Amino acid sequence: MTELSGLEAELRGTVRGEVGFDVTSRALVTMDASNYRRVPAGVVAPRDADDVAAVLEVCRARGVPVVARGGGTSIAGQATGTGVVLDFTRHMNRLVGLDPVARTAVVQPGLVLDRLQEAAAPHGLRFGPDPSTHGRCTLGGMIGNNSCGSHSVAWGTTADSVRELDVITARGRRLRLGQDWAGAPEGLRELVSGDLARLRTGFPDLPRRISGYALDALLPERGADVARSFCGSEGTLGILTEATVRLVESPRARALAVLGYADESAAAEAAAGLLAFGPLTVEGMAADLVPSPAGLPRGGAWLFVETGGESADEARARADTIVRAADALDTSVITGPAEQRALWRIREDAAGTATRMPDGAEAWPGWEDCAVPPARLGVYLRDFRALLSAHGLRGTPYGHFGDGCIHVRIDFDLLGEEGVARFRRFSEELAELVVAHGGSLSGEHGDGLARAELLPRMYGAELVALFERAKAVWDPDDLLNPGVLVGPAPLDANLRFSVLPREPVDVAFGYPSDGGDFSAAIRRCVGVAKCRTTEVSGSSVMCPSFRATGEEEHSTRGRARLLHEMLGGEVVTDGWRSTEVRDALDLCLSCKGCRSDCPVGVDMATYKAEFLHHHYEGRRRPAAHYSMGRLPVWLRLVARTRTAPVVNALASVRPLAALAKRLGGIAPERGIPRLAAEPFSRWERRRERKRLRGWAAEVRAGRRPDFPSGMAFLWPDTFTEYLSPQVGRAAVRVLEAAGVGVMELPARGWKARRSEDGRLEGFGMSVLSPRRTRACCGLTYLSTGQLDRARAVLRETLDLLEPFLLERSDLGPDVELDADDEPEPEPEPDPESGLDPELDSGSGDEFPSPPPPFVVLEPSCAAALRSDLPELLPDDPRAARLAARVLTFAEALEQLAPDWTPPRLNRPVTGQTHCHQHAVLGDAPDRRLREAAALTGDLSGGCCGLAGNFGFEKGHFEVSRACAEEQLLPAVREAAPGTVVLADGFSCRTQLEQLAGVPGRHLAEVLAEGLEN
């Protein structure tokens, strides 16, 4: 420890960038996107090349290894290390210059690829290679791995796009690498000259040969290109500080030919034959990785063949030519940019979706990207499948079929000794198979810790010895990323899972998709880092706090890494009490965006609630957990005492409001929302009595009342009930106009009589139990991690609603009311109604079949009922039943009144889809309803930033505002006059009001206004 503190102190005194030897900094970089884990001594974010040189000098003097790291999306373990990790993403991330005439760009290693593409696009240019992680991978990492991407059949690998590289060697020499031996370290030229024959014959001729060092690029007939030779060296030869790269002309128009085949082997055999037509891509994918084949041609596997041209017609004509030449089961050509993007998104997300087998079993990298000659891909895949079967393993191949490069995740058991041993045996045999087909162990992602041990099987001992000599020329002290490429560690050492507990951790949520195992839930994050994208794409949400801060610890991946280390106990040593994990989770908005946008379905909102539950167990909580976490209690008290006007008056007095906010842990910048003078349920009760009186009058007059064709309960969520009852009133008006009868939820508990086997025999409302209660989704308790209280509230809700959650299997042979209980009408009965009080209770047989659903107006409450409720109470069948009966406002109209036509409003809309709506509920019914009502325009993605209690909590205001400024507020400011600002969530409306002075409206309010007009 003294050694580390001395190293840290010396670095702090030498480097201008950040130096982090703390728990969080180290925990965040223990892993990349591979199966491997190595714990670093510390992390440095250099500001410039001088900082890099200073770090190298200090570490060389102390014998501490140095590892360069970009986006951390490497899949072979080469972005991990035990010494000092250089994080280039924080400062050395600029586009230094772009010359559209020369078609070159000068970039720093931490620049994300998409930022370069955005800068080049206005000039009709682009960087050729485009890995699926293009939204977060860096140019430095791409150069280190010699990355490729889907367009490599047209534009090659990163090495094909590199002109010059500025590099600092481990001994501090600054070199500019290029052709004709430019920048070559002393001794490299002599090494090559002494082994020309081996260099000319020892490398397989492949478009995707990434394994080992590219020493053949130094042959005189290949221009003695030192820069090209450096590509793919995985940070073992020198530290890149700047690169000059070549740009290519981007086609003005594109078309996508989708070709269907029986299976991936048939698709693979067809791929090589399409290369003669000059496509931009030839990508393959099997049905296992496609969420839905809708819109795709018939088949069990597909080739995505992209063509380009100066015009849409030219691109389409080229695609049609490929379709005619292809021997496919079925084909289609897609020309619309949006449709093409949707298909490419499926392909890009495969790096994550492939981590789960169809039955939910985990699958892992390690043999992600072997490459063989394209003409041999079909037979190789059949042999590969046979090898999988021989070892009892499963995997779903996909990838760059046109280049003979296959990605696959395999369901290795990397937790137990037997599984790890099988992993090693399979790896050794697969290496032999790849070599037998004339292939490369790595076709894109590098060797790293995963394959370096097996390089002698591909190259032979003598060529590998030449690699070792080359490494010694560049880095004689073995300072840079030791154990990678040469002198490798065993491929089954340093596995990331070795530190995790072998027994399930005691947790509150059920984690049904992970077998109830919290460790398995955390293992979902494989590190592909889609959460690190810096811009919202379409309607996506994940991860707003990372985009606001730019800090890894505030990304979904960063938080998952800390939770992984918390379970491991080596770096984060104080378990659930960890302040490091707490602080990282503090800026998680619980937006649930990761639940839908993360390719592997990480649900950080649930993990945060779980952590807070344990972290504060038996301890005093933050003030906000008491003030906002128990909001339903306080608002119910105000409603019962009818003191809302008094509370509003006091809140308008600045000193009193400031005191209340200070005591309640509320951000001082926030205004306190006004309470409604009358709760929604009070208005609803009056309306219900009026309706009952009307029906009674019809009966007395001998006429049958005009009962609604469908019935639904309207859920009295806390926000609609106490803060925005106008939304509830509007929803009632619209639903009833559509022919849906709206019923108020009961506010009294029911007493049930059950048989010995638990079957229901009867129930009724007891006059001896007059205590009123309210149904509640428990959202505020969930978001603050008060899970014991959330469970109690949800069980009380299920008890309250049990008669309306029945299935026939619950009923006994003769269901009756309990004879000992006298049914009681709802509170405040109206003696003038003339209706029999027993109509208000009964056995449940009076309700139509199927039973009425529950319409929830607040998206966050609907999401809590649909997802959190069954996960928190997995053993209570009533929880799943209630979740299945929850409908949003738009879903209710679509399902209960399918023939109803809403008023045509003919107005543009703006606003933002609620993050929980996007992540859990889906917004397709809302979009269809808006279209039917002639509300034109799309809502933006992202998160409003208020996110329930998050934006109100002290210390969160700036992040909350930054999230709103990303999409929501600009969309509202840019909207034309007369545009309707839609915001179904109370938090979204509050954020709009407090930050922009704009009133947001629920869709129900807009439609209700249309009905009136």
Image (tube, rainbow, N blue to C red):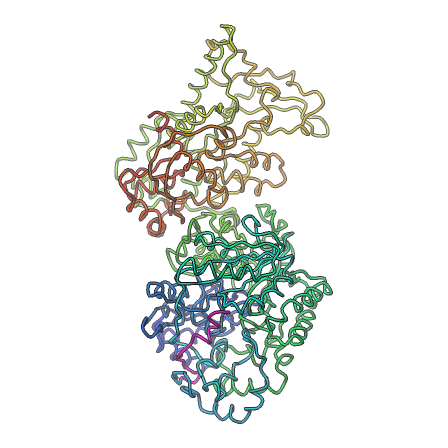
Is 389 placed above or below 678 here?
Answer: below
Looking at the picture, how far across and down is residue 540, in whole percent? 44, 50
Looking at the picture, how far across and down is residue 508, in whole percent? 57, 46
Looking at the picture, how far across and down is residue 488, in whole percent? 59, 78
Q: Quadrant of the C terminus?
A: top left
Viewer-side residue, 870 vs 629: 870
Q: Write down the quadrant of residue 641 in the picture.
A: top left
Q: Which residues are magenta?
A: 153-172
Looking at the picture, how far across and down is residue 178, in whole percent? 41, 83
Is 595 placed above or below 532 here?
Answer: above
Is 167 covered by the magenta stretch? yes
Is 140 placed above or below 285 here?
Answer: below
Is 141 covered by the magenta stretch? no
Q: Is residue 15 left or right of residue 630?
A: left
Q: Is residue 436 something one can see in this rendering? A: yes
Q: Is residue 616 something one can see in this rendering? A: no
Q: Write down the quadrant of residue 351 in the picture.
A: bottom right
Q: Is residue 38 left or right of residue 247?
A: right
Viewer-side residue, 738 vs 904: 904
Viewer-side residue, 905 vs 623: 905
Tag count: 0
Viewer-side residue, 828 vs 945: 945
Q: Write down the quadrant of residue 15 in the picture.
A: bottom left
